[in-house]
Image: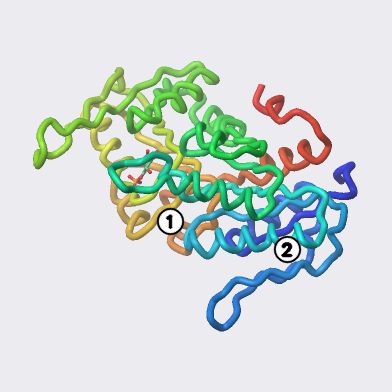
Amino acid sequence: MSKNNNMQLIAGNSNRALAEAISAYLSVPLTKASIRRFSDMEVFAEILENVRGMDTFVIQSTSYPANDNLMELLITIDALRRGSARRITAVIPYFGYARQDRKTGGRTPISAKLVANLITAAGADRVLTLELHAGQIQGFFDIPVDNLNIAPVFLPELTKRFKDEQLVLVSPDVGGAVRARGMAKRINADIAIIDKRREKAGVSEVMNVIGDVDGKVCIMVDDIVDSGGTLCNAASALKAKGAKEVHSYVVHGVLSGGAVARISSSEIERMVISDSIAATEAVRVSETIEQLSVAPLIGEAIKRISEERSISALFK
Ligand code: R5P
């Protein structure tokens, strides 16, 4: 049981199973709330227990349907603020819109910044999230942001499963090299990076594998798998360079469209994702995709925030 009796956990509808698992980890029941739609699909949130003076945590991933889930988060925060909660932490295991973190052309938005402004304006005092697409997104907020690292969830399973193998951790693109290097360092593994290049417009991309993967078990690490294109193509490039097996560990399984089928018929032997996003039926029945729960990690972080203890100590 948490020492902090003022802690209250409020679950949005995006990932009820994860919220329940966090509640079980903390031995703190979910606060009764009704977050529902009016007939015209407007979102309405009603917190059915007193929250005055409480340390409240709203658990809501802004995953598909991103706009509905974001509105639920904002409106629930507003309800808590107007209900005089002492502190409101937005717990966002998957932070949607994170890939829109810069202008990609003239007259385009930086939607991740807009979303950060909305969360702050709604009344959040702090944010707890997991493996932001880009660490700099923390700076889009002027309130404290704790951005958890997935290593304590993925690495114990990885090292146990492959204890007799010579592993290479692979970033499927140059942008993910820091993440792959960080994980490789912790388990003393080599790294490789896939450098995608399109020499000329209209000519298909060439995948250059930087690093030695011949005869080795490759573990691709990434923050997001969406269409699966990045990882499936990277897996083919690794196999072409002689990789013995290709596995993948990805934090956020967005898995839109036909991603699950694409992954199942690819060179990827096995893909591990976290439960930051609720599993669809296709994920649940997939023989290639497995989920590892981040509930203990997020639960522990919530506990530490509530008790004003260090979170970085979790990653030492
Ligand atoms: C890109 O920068 C991200 O880290 C992922 O690699 C990307 O979002 C994956 O998308 P997809 O699965 O559609 O290739």
Image x and y of residue 174, in percent? 33, 27
Q: How far is disc 1 from disc 2 in space, using C-alphas?
A: 38 Å
Which mark is nearer the camera, 1 or 2?
2
Image disc number at residue 286: 1
Is residue 192 depicted above or below 134 in this figure?
above
Q: Is mark 1 within 8 Å of ligand 1?
A: no
Image disc number at residue 121: none
> In front: 69, or 236?
69
Image x and y of residue 195, in percent? 26, 27
Q: Which residue is mark 2?
A: 79
Image x and y of residue 62, in percent? 54, 55
Does residue 291 appear in this view?
Answer: no
Q: Amino acid at mark 2?
A: Ala
Element under label 2? Answer: helix
Q: Amino acid at mark 1?
A: Ser
Does residue 182 appear in this view?
Answer: yes
Q: Which residue is located at x 56 percent, y 83 percent?
A: 39
Element under label 1? Answer: loop
Quadrant of the rendered structure where residue 315 is?
top right
> Image check: 219 left or right of 53?
left
Q: Which residue is located at x 74 percent, y 67 percent?
A: 33
Question: Quarter containing ligand 1?
Answer: top left
Q: Residues within 10 Å of mark 1 (few under 14, many from 20)?
A: some
Q: Residues within 10 Å of mark 2 (few under 14, many from 20)?
A: some
Image x and y of residue 1, in percent? 87, 46
Colouring of the image:
rainbow
- What is the quadrant of the C terminus in the image? top right
> Image check: 231 left or right of 41?
left
The residue positioned farthest toward the front in the image shown: 107
